[in-house]
Image (tube, rainbow, N blue to C red):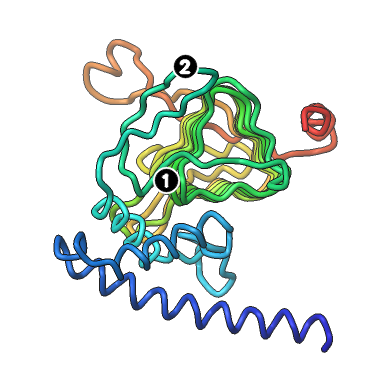
Amino acid sequence: MPESVSETLQQSLTNVEHAELETRIETAFAAGAAAVQDASAMAAFVELRDALEAGTLRSAEPDTSTALGWRVNAWVKRGILLGFRLGQLQGLGPNVGGEHFPFVDKHTYPARDWAVADGVRVVPGGSSVRAGAYLAPGVVCMPPMYVNVGAYVDAGTMVDSHALVGSCAQVGKRVHLSAAAQIGGVLEPVNASPVILEDDVLVGGNCGVYEGTIVRKGAVLAAGTVLTRGTPVYDVVTGEVLRATAGMPLIIPENAVVVPGARAVQKGKAAEWGLSVYTPVIVKYRDAKTELSLALEDLLR
């Protein structure tokens, strides 16, 4: 059988399995508190969690047929929330070298274990990845960092010290999350788009990306840049002001270089006092010089 035909068949089988799982998750979620005593609800949740960890199921995935370029799988988010409903508090702390490290969390979301065969480099020093998160082979985790449930982190990405990848956040290939970068997550509302960083994005130290913001391929966020749904972004290259709308999140264009900036307040006491407020500014788009400045990324991996 040709490889392309085999892949198509496998994808069709996967789609059927996911459709059946979706029905089971929706039924269990709709049952409310009654699901806690239902073994079939727990079985459906565990199947969903395992698929999330394997990367075969995602809370949001690329879809060129949509205006956003991404499709949110709201039922997957409901399945994640179902896991919190089903979970009971349990001591989860490991015993390492005779020393006990106590943790208490929902038993449905323990920390993930790792093996060499996973191809994920988890450097010692206090990092944790929650069950139900996917990290592709080639991901590097520098301590301490944290990846929450439902997140998807693709191949070749580095999650640096003190960085956070929030619940359901989608992180592409060869992304660098520098020290103390915060990538927000979103579980509710379930139909809301999570934060998405596409391939080859560089997020500088102490950056924050929140509230469903999408950062397109190759963009660079300079240290200290904060992106939220309510923050306009001023593009001095094109003369545009980028904003979120009722139906669309804030979107940073491909290859944009964004730095922290400020804009003067024009009214009232703030104008009288000469005050300004924070705003991100697109100062350029990536070029050969920018590429040279990022060459160190390959060495770090």
Give me the disc on residue 231: none
| Label 1 Cα neighbours within 10 Å, binned few <14 / some 14-19 / many ≥20 | many
Return the residue at label 1: 167
Q: Which mark's residue is nearer the viewer, 2 or 1?
A: 2
- 12 versus 248 height, above or below: below
| Label 2 Cα neighbours within 10 Å, binned few <14 / some 14-19 / many ≥20 | few
| Residue at image point 82% right, 89% down | 1
Q: Nearer the viewer, residue 281 or 84?
A: 84
| Residue at image point 29% right, 58% down | 82
How far from the left and from the top, in percent, is residue 124? Answer: 62, 23
Callout 2, which amino acid? Glu
- 182 versus 133 height, above or below: above
- 191 versus 299 height, above or below: below
Disc 2 from disc 1: Cα separation: 30 Å
Return the residue at label 2: 99
Callout 1, which amino acid? Ser
How far from the left and from the top, in percent, is residue 118? Answer: 68, 47
Element carrying mark 1? loop
| Residue at image point 50% right, 58% down | 52
How far from the left and from the top, in percent, is residue 161? Answer: 58, 23
Whether residue 232 appears in this view of the structure is no
Whether residue 255 appears in this view of the structure is yes
Q: Quadrant of residue 293?
A: top right
Element carrying mark 2? strand
